Image (cartoon, coloured by chain):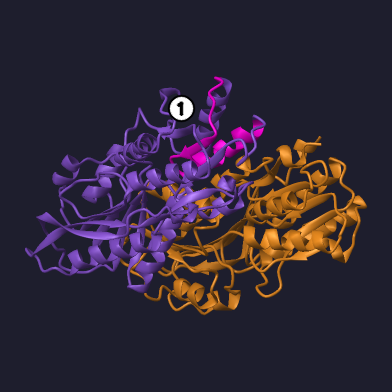
Chain colours: A orange, B purple
Amino acid sequence: MATENRVPAPRHRAGTTTLSVVHRKERTGIVALAVPDLEEPYFAELTALLVRRADQRGLSVLIQLTAGDHEREVNVANGTGLPPTDGLIHIPRALSVADLTRRATPGPLVLLGEHILVSPFTHVTIDNRAASYAATEHLAQVGCARVAYVGTRDARPSDAADRRFTGYRDAVAALGLAAEAELVAQVDAFTPDEGLRAVADLVRHGIAFDGLVCANDSVAFGALVALQAAGRSVPDDVAVVGIDDVRGARFTAPALTSVSPDKEALVERALSELERQIATPPGGNLPVEHVVVGARVVPRASTAR
Amino acid sequence: MATENRVPAPRHRAGTTTLSVVHRKERTGIVALAVPDLEEPYFAELTALLVRRADQRGLSVLIQLTAGDHEREVNVANGTGLPPTDGLIHIPRALSVADLTRRATPGPLVLLGEHILVSPFTHVTIDNRAASYAATEHLAQVGCARVAYVGTRDARPSDAADRRFTGYRDAVAALGLAAEAELVAQVDAFTPDEGLRAVADLVRHGIAFDGLVCANDSVAFGALVALQAAGRSVPDDVAVVGIDDVRGARFTAPALTSVSPDKEALVERALSELERQIATPPGGNLPVEHVVVGARVVPRASTAR
């Protein structure tokens, strides 16, 4: 059944490395959040949840917008130009493990989201490969044979984008779907503009496809507009799936099927891991945690056929 | 011409009262921002702009989500449970002038957005009456005669909602459009869910309308879905206008015409007014400023007829 495409259930794996926690003398009651932008609805929703849950724990959240810019991400990781805080939740795009290892002030840190899969830092994420695998499998289950993928990256590679593409590619191979290079469309950013452009290009080049996995919902919003402009009916001509399950997915025409990460779990785990680090006495060692939370396909009209 | 529906140009009016600024000894480099939520795209966009512009001024932004809840808004205004900050930008929903007058620690404060039109506190806003007047006038110009309004409030009255409805009502009277009570639909919140429900109700009750002014874009997103579900073509059967011009307005089907507030000006003025208060020596008096920034109709496919 289409609704049964479940990404593996939450698992919790203790890391093999440890983290030495350096402490400020006084608690500030402030945690910093580094996030690429708030115009992307997924980040806005995650940030809103984080601020609410932090508030319930007596913590205020200081927002730093990085635009995914490497220098800005490094500066926030180092606390450069920031007021004192108790710790940092970082949603990185361009940051490398090397950058983090070189941190000037290695205070409490949790990485949140899709970048940097394997690292000696505590990290909370969904399984991005499983998410796009489930999206592709869902399209196969509703009868799609030629499933296109919109959302490979070139100029700004990211672990998340790579993992999502891998999930699609693996599902295509495992399920015997058409595996053609022309079915894969690259974008410069996970935005509606880029989704619109990329799908308009597929159509203009005469590529035949009956399903579309979009790397995130924002890309899918643009894809739906491009399909409508091209006179392709969704879901009858082309079934469309996004990833992130942002609130707007319910208000596209037709409503967008999406892979829904467990956002509450992402935020709760990120905060509890950070609090654990904050509470550890100076010099204390903590195991590094790699936390993977669940995600599941939420079927809507865009794949109802 | 439809594109000429300009809301009055920015004006700047010195108030008659003054504000006594109380100072903390040390600057924190932090300003607090009280905002109802970040799931509403307009607030997310405004917050993103504010964080970026504050950063350029060397200020970090501490986010407080109030959900428009009175007690939370009062607490933030009083700094209750907050770390020390240099000042507060407050986007209130439920806060009254009396609440603000009773503030425990009357530090630097700027009110941003649509609530509390007249107050002895510095305030930066758009002209909400002019915005919905312009939206209604735009519909008249594209040939609508029976323009419905979605977005009056009852349970949670707000100055902004009231002013927007007044603008519609005034335009209807001035332009000789149909003025019937049944053309006005109430919502519980400015959300897509409520827009969908309210417009589905209008359709179900057999109310005839050929134009729709929505109190904001989120309401309009739901309205477009309800119209499509009812088999009404946009813009041919019903032309639709929103207010806020959020990014998603370009990616509805059809793209949504919206009244676009000058968000850059809102944010710049809010920050510069706050900085002026922060820089004023203890005991210094500053004139209260009531700043109104511009807004203009951005025509798109939802009214192209």
Q: Could you say where residue B106 lies in the image, as x and y percent from the top left?
A: 15, 53
Look at the image and say whether residue B216 sits in the magenta stretch: yes
Q: Residue at x 53, y 44 (%)?
A: B142
- What residue range appears in magenta? B205-229
Q: Could you say where residue B126 lies in the image, as x and y percent from the top left?
A: 33, 52
Q: In which quadrant of the rendered image does the N terminus of chain A lie? A: top right
| Extreme residue toward the top, this view | B205
The answer to whether residue A50 is visible is: no
Q: Amino acid at mark 1?
A: Leu
Q: Residue at x 73, y 59 (%)?
A: A164
The answer to whether residue A142 is visible is: yes
Front-most of B241 and B58?
Answer: B241
Front-most of B283 and B242?
Answer: B242
User: Taking B76 as reference, is A173 above or below it?
Assistant: below
Question: Mark 1 highlights which residue?
Answer: B183
> On the picture, is B276 further left or further right than A300?
left
Determine which quarter of the picture holds residue A279: bottom left
Q: In which quadrant of the rendered image does the C terminus of chain A lie? A: top right
